[in-house]
Image: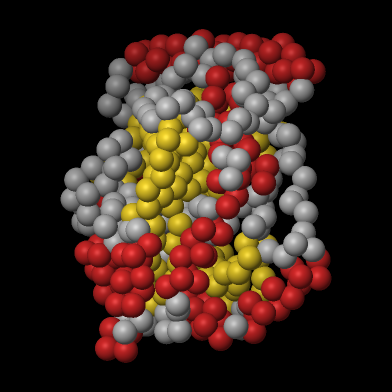
Amino acid sequence: MSLPAFKPTHFFTRLEYFLSVSSLPQAIQSLSRKLEKLDIHPQGEPIIQLSVTACVMPMIAWIASQPCYPRIYWHGRDTQEEVAALGCCKDFIFEDAVDDNQLSQAYQTQRSLSTNQEIRYYGGVAFDRHTECWPEYGRAHFILPRVELRRSGDEYKLLVNLNVESRDIEQERNLALQALAALVPPKPLAPPNKIQLLSRSDRPNKLRWHELVNQVTHDRFIQDTPKVVLSRLTQLEVNEKVDPWMLLASWQGRNQNSFQFGFQFSPESAFISCTPERLYRRRQREVFTEALAGTTTRGLNEAEDALLAQQLLDDTKNSHENQLVREHIVDALTPLSNYVGADELAKVFKLSHIQHLHRAIRAELKPGVNDFQILQALHPTPAVGGLPKASAINFIRQREGYTRGWYAGACGYFNKYESEFAVAIRSALIEPGRINLFAGAGIVSGSEAEAEWNELENKLKTIMSILTEV
């Protein structure tokens, strides 16, 4: 099997660079004029958004060139949509213990601030909202950006957001104008380069992994908890600076049929992901989700690849794992929905180095059901936590040995009309001198520790091939 051709979306040509440089100032100037002329009423909506048509722009290269933070990038899996967002107009973050009532109230408050269906909050919810989380990211953190560049198909828009809920109107106008004036044209990303590893460590290590898998597959345990998704943190120590945006662009080129996103709240840390798994997509009252569980490798040629795919479809352990996830999602959505439909038969979802079993699920929500209720019902899914949810997550919390943070969390955006969240399973946390990589495997009856450890290695193959020679 040959790897998919790299599509140089972000390593752009000299011609594209000069087109961007020449036309970006025009869009900024046009939006600034709109902003200066805007008549803001104190009794009007507290969140205001303005937009103008913009030029073709290499999004990741553009966001990597900007001098401000936060920096947020979002690219849908099967949509023609791409977003690069900068700065913060308004945010809400929960760094300490938070219950679902507080989160729900914060979410509903943000939604009520504007009737504009284009207003979006981007962010994420940690895998486990009840344990300590990463600094800056929090247990939940959402941002209304100051500036956004959005692409829909071949159309680009430059947007600016204003928050006059708690700020002086003219002060907010000036802050928005300053943010636009600070924008710079994109610079080409540095070409991908292999890094020199100082060391690698795994948590849990291989010995501990075998112990955990044996605990989960023990007859007495598995009677009450038929599935636990165990994961591993792989830490790579390096003595050179790693550009998270170059890394994400390279990763994107290898797995174009995945969600790609990045959150960089400050220069010290960036969380990036190139993940195949959708948590859900909502369009008004229609919801699309999926059961993505069960994994095998790709073949070296078409015949071997097809054979491995068929073996995956026929494999009892993987089929059982996927069916458990499907049943749980249908059961979770049923109280919120007038209708829930799911594929009876699994299909194969292919990525560059691995392939998964996949079942599509669609629901029509009852009137009044909101995004937070969907998040509450679905996250974390059995594909990243286990079943029953409470006992599986409790086992992970006590035994796994590290803080997952936003790994296996829900990342995306919400607004009044539509929302979309992905599950951050193929992801990396970039810190000074360290790259943190994550991988997990569903442990069910019949799981073998050595095979599951090898599955973790397969899931890291794409990102490791970008980073190192090995």
Could you tell me residue 402's position as x and y percent?
Answer: 28, 53
Image quadrant in which the N terminus is located: bottom right
Q: Position of residue 118 (x, y in %)?
A: 53, 39
Using the rendered view, name the quadrant where residue 19 is placed. Answer: top right
From this viewpoint, which residue is outermost toward the left? 97
- Rendered view: 194 above or below 257: above
- In the picture, measured across the screen, residue 38 lies left or right of residue 62, that is left
Tell me if residue 435 can be seen: yes
Q: Is residue 432 above or below residue 329?
A: above
- Quarter holding the C terminus is top right
* Pick the front one: 140 or 274: 274
Which residue is located at x 32 percent, y 89 percent? 219
Q: Is residue 62 above or below residue 196?
A: above
Colour theme: secondary structure
Numbered label tally: 0
Which sits in the foreground, 97 or 248? 248
Q: Name the one closer to the observer, 84 or 203.
A: 203
Name the residue: 49% across, 61% down: 456
Which residue lies at the image location 47% right of the left edge and 36% below the top edge?
197
Q: Residue at x 33, y 54 (%)?
A: 203
Q: Position of residue 374 (x, y in %)?
A: 41, 63
Q: Is residue 150 visible?
A: no
Above/below status of 431 relative to 348: above
Q: Which x, y percent locates residue 143?
A: 39, 36
**Residue 383 sits in which quadrant?**
bottom left
Residue 287 vs residue 457, the one in the foreground = 457
